[in-house]
Amino acid sequence: MSDNHRPEFSADYESDEGHASAEARPWPSEPSVEDWKVELNDVLAGERDYILRRHGSVSAHVEKLIRASVSERKARETFQEALRQLVEEWQPFSPSSDYYVACMLDLIGAYLPRGGFRKILGFMGYGFRFPVIEAYTGGFGSGMDLHMKALVDLEYYYPSADPKWEDDPAFVSYVQVLRQHLEDSEYGAYNGYALSRLIQLNIIKPQEQIVRDTIELNGGVLNELIELSFSDLRRPQLEDDLNYIYTHCFIIGLEAKQVFEQVLKERDVIMENSGEQLKVYIPDLGKEIDLRVPEELMLEVLEEGGERGFKRAMAAAAYAQNEDE
């Protein structure tokens, strides 16, 4: 493509040193699909890094260009088509810079082009992982976990689950990827997100055994679980959610219970222990909740048998005795 067909940029298109290019020209008043493709390719290549760092996202830059056009509606249409084409051309399996991937994922998450979901899901479905950009790089996306960013992008396509989700092949594949991130130990950093997301979608219930198993393997998931419990979405089930999580932790053992309590303390929740019962007061809700392990579940500690079950029973008894003293 010749230079005569390139978009014409205003003085807003500054170099990394903050100086306008001597060849700066106005942005086309009616940008075509090709104009947008050239501009987006420049963004993906890092030639707009100063602008992205100043605005904080690729979408902020795009929206500014759309507002500068004569017809915002037309400019948005041509942009969407240009982005669709670029996403279709993108091959996540092919080597590309972390910077390129960061900008592409930012665009996909902001505008949800049709092919974006398929490209990300296909890459993850084969067990591949997007990288983490080291903070010292300094450019747009520095310090960003691109794999988590990609997971969140997928979430935007399916903020909730259809009651007949099993009839949607794309959603079924999405659930499979989430379960992969939950059950595979290599995805330990993403276990909490995957578990919380599956609960949010009502694929997994908080009382299920898999929740307890995940907490036992990775206590860090309690942060995400409790955060989900306090979210607006789960607030009506807050008492039940906390009781299920508390029960899981109590049965697992003293360490898990202590982590549970520490996460609540970080949310300024006031607690009072009494054996297998935990009274919690949530100041911002003005609500007091009694968390108690059901009697039938208390037996699980002993029914496991062997040294493991014995240690859990002793730990629970010792904890209750210390609290009484």
Image (tube, helix red, strand yellow):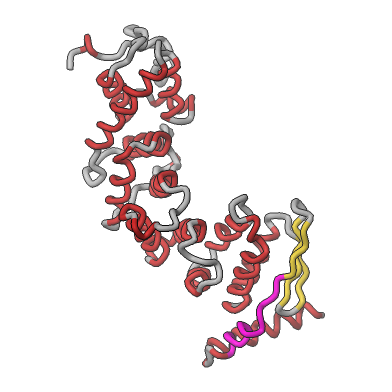
Let me know if residue 256 appears in the view.
yes
222 inside magenta stretch: no
Residue 309 location in percent, x, y?
A: 56, 88
Q: Find residue 292 and report its image quarter.
A: bottom right
Looking at this view, name the residue that lies furthest to the bottom.
Answer: 306
Residue 61 location in percent, x, y?
A: 43, 23
Residue 31 location in percent, x, y?
A: 32, 15
Residue 293 location in percent, x, y?
A: 66, 77
Q: Main secondary structure of the magenta part?
A: helix
Q: Quadrant of the N terminus?
A: top left
Looking at this view, name the residue that lies furthest to the right.
Answer: 325
Looking at this view, name the residue that lies furthest to the left.
Answer: 1
> Which residues, given as a range, are shown in magenta?
291-302
Let me know if residue 145 appears in the view.
no
- Depth check: give the residue in front, 5 or 311: 5
Q: Quadrant of the C terminus?
A: bottom right
Q: Is residue 214 left or right of residue 270?
A: left
294 inside magenta stretch: yes
- Depth check: give the residue in front, 5 or 130: 5
| 132 is higher (above) or lower (below) than 80 | below
Which residue shows up at 80% across the image and 80% down it? 324
Q: Is residue 325 left or right of residue 92?
A: right
Which residue shows up at 30% across the image and 14% down it? 7
Which residue shows up at 61% across the image and 52% down it? 231
